[in-house]
């Protein structure tokens, strides 16, 4: 089979960071090729170069043997017939699906006036082929994350792309959306389209990929046949050493004291009648499918959303939390799920972003003491291995996973003793996940208590003392450690089991 893409001696230097070092490998026509590596390994950078987002690099790229050099992503789509499904969903919300698909290209193709009847007809045919349950005439703002992802794929097909790359496409998708995405990838492959697939969820690699290329620290390590390798071998190549990929707890420090009690909490149209207790030194897991209402419950407890009924008690006392400032004062901390918009400030350094919610800790004579701020950042950066580690590095220039770590550092810096982590390891590589689990355990040892919201079953069963399962805004069941069975939990989450 021919080579769809060949990377030849590709290097990329950012100020202070060599993101890619002389990378050479090729992707075969019609295969699903995984690109793997730890956070900051250079995966997104390589894709950005391929798609003309980054135009300043060394080395050569060949598509079907022809050297290419795209000026921008539009150029790549039109001339190279190569499209990217973004890590961060990238659509204009106030347009229709049809308008979005043709955005930026309609002028070129149809002259000055766009014939939307024709466009919508073509787009609807593509949506039909993709088995999508929405139509070209609908507004994008009404679509779910999964539907928006499908929209991006439709866009690629509309432009007859022969190569489609996907950077962590499933991180915001439901189970159902993920499995339909995998069906579509299978179909794309059958029609000869080449797919490059980036994900930190290794199980997915074994489900859909033919070969995998591993990058470590900007360097090419190897290209392997997925069928003849194992998860452990892939991890070892990514990390450079043996790392367990099992989220097992090593200590138990649950005490009797109830630090947080929630009674009959409701927010109409979001969730109803939620009650639970969190004990000191405990990790309480909240499992559910994406959209089950767990994030909304946590936002209400944290004072970010209003409740319509119910009460919250902290350390035995009724807590009237009207806003997030009240919550912080009562010792609550929330690592939000939507980190791009709620997590860090642009044009701000790692150390400053880390200090955002704990400024009073770094004061000397009423002024923020930079040294104290840097020390605090550096201590946590070492623990969770933030890379690059420089305190004055701009967070926005970090890789996706390392941005997540900075936001995690921000919440670890507060004196909160009840920490709520919403999808704490989304976008985080295997090795760093394990560091984060160990860190959680050290927080438990300090007497803190943790709620973890996660859609990853192995994570939730591995780290929780108890698990509450959600389905469509309702608490379905509460399970204690010996009862953790993945299939049972999934059945509750899908509403197929009821207590
Ligand atoms: N605009 C930029 N300025 C400076 N450094 C950058 C910039 N973009 C990326 N980098 C650096 O390049 C390196 C590679 O980043 P990249 O985003 O490609 O990693 P990745 O493999 O996609 O990681 P992740 O799994 O976390 O998404 C990182 O060290 C990152 O900090
Ligand atoms: Mg990335």
Image (spheres, grey):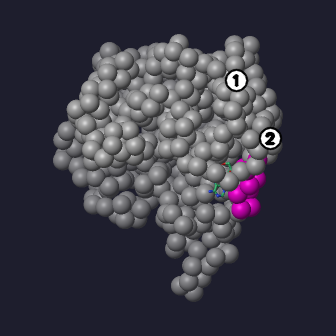
Indicate left or right for 141 with 161 as reference.
Answer: left
Closer to us: 165 or 209: 165
Identify the element where label 1 is drawn.
strand
Lateral position of residue 454 relative to residue 377, left or right: left
Decide: few, some or many residues near mark 1? Use Cα within 10 Å; few <14, some 14-19, many ≥20: some
Q: In this view, does 235 lie above or below 319?
A: above
Residue that protrudes farthest toward the bottom in the picture: 365
Query: How many marks on residues?
Result: 2
The magenta stretch spans residue 15: yes
**Nearer-the-camera pick, 456 or 89:** 89
Res 57 seen here = yes
> Where residue 3 is drawn, which disc sits there?
1
Q: Give the range drawn in magenta.
A: 11-19
Residue 475 percent coordinates (x, y): 31, 30
Label 2: element kind: strand
Instruction: Look at 44% across and 59% down and name the residue there.
Output: 331
Q: Which of marks 1 and 2 is nearer the N terminus?
A: 1
> In percent of the image, x 58 and y 41: which residue is there?
51
């Amino acid at each position: 089979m021919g080579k769809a893409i060949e990377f030849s001696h590709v290097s990329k230097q950012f100020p202070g960071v060599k993101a890619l070092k002389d990378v050479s490998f090729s992707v075969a026509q019609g295969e699903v090729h995984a690109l793997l590596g730890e956070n900051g390994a250079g995966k997104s950078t390589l894709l950005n170069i391929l798609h003309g987002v980054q135009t300043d690099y060394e080395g050569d790229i060949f598509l079907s043997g022809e050297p290419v050099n795209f000026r921008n992503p539009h150029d790549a789509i039109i001339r190279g017939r190569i499209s990217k499904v973004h890590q961060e969903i990238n659509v204009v919300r106030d347009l229709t699906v049809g308008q979005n698909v043709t955005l930026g290209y309609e002028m070129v193709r149809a002259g000055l006036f766009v014939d939307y009847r024709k466009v919508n007809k073509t787009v609807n045919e593509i949506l039909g082929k993709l088995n999508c349950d929405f139509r070209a005439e609908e507004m994008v703002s009404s679509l779910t994350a999964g539907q928006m992802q499908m929209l991006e794929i439709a866009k690629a097909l509309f432009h007859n792309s022969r190569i489609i790359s996907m950077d962590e496409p499933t991180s915001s998708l439901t189970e159902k959306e993920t499995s339909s995405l995998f069906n579509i990838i299978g179909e794309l492959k059958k029609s000869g389209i080449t797919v490059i697939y980036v994900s930190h969820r290794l199980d997915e690699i074994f489900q859909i990929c033919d070969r995998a290329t591993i990058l470590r620290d900007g360097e090419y390590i190897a290209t392997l046949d997925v069928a003849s390798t194992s998860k452990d071998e892939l991890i070892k190549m990514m990390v450079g050493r043996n790392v367990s990929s099992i989220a097992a707890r090593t200590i138990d420090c649950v005490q009797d004291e109830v630090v947080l009690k929630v009674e009959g909490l409701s927010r109409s149209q979001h969730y109803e009648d939620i009650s639970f207790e969190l004990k000191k030194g405990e990790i309480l897991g909240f499992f559910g499918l994406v959209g089950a209402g767990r994030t909304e419950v946590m936002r209400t407890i944290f004072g970010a959303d209003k409740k319509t009924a119910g009460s919250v008690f902290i350390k035995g006392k009724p807590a009237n939390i009207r806003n997030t400032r009240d919550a912080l004062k009562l010792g609550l901390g929330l690592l939000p799920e939507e980190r791009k918009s709620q997590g860090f400030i642009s044009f701000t350094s790692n150390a400053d972003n880390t200090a955002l919610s704990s400024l009073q800790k770094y004061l000397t004579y009423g002024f923020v003491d930079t040294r104290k701020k840097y020390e605090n950042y550096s201590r946590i950066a070492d623990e969770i291995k933030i890379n690059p580690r420089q305190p004055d590095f701009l967070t926005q220039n970090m890789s996706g996973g390392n941005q997540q770590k900075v936001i995690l550092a921000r919440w670890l810096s507060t004196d909160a003793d009840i920490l709520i982590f919403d999808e704490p390891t989304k976008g985080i590589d295997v090795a760093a996940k394990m560091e984060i689990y160990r860190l959680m355990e050290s927080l438990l040892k300090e007497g803190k208590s943790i709620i973890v919201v996660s859609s990853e079953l192995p994570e939730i069963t591995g780290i929780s003392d108890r698990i509450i399962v959600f389905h469509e805004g309702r608490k379905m069941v509460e399970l204690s450690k010996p009862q953790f069975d993945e299939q049972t939990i999934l059945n509750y989450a899908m509403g197929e089991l009821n207590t």
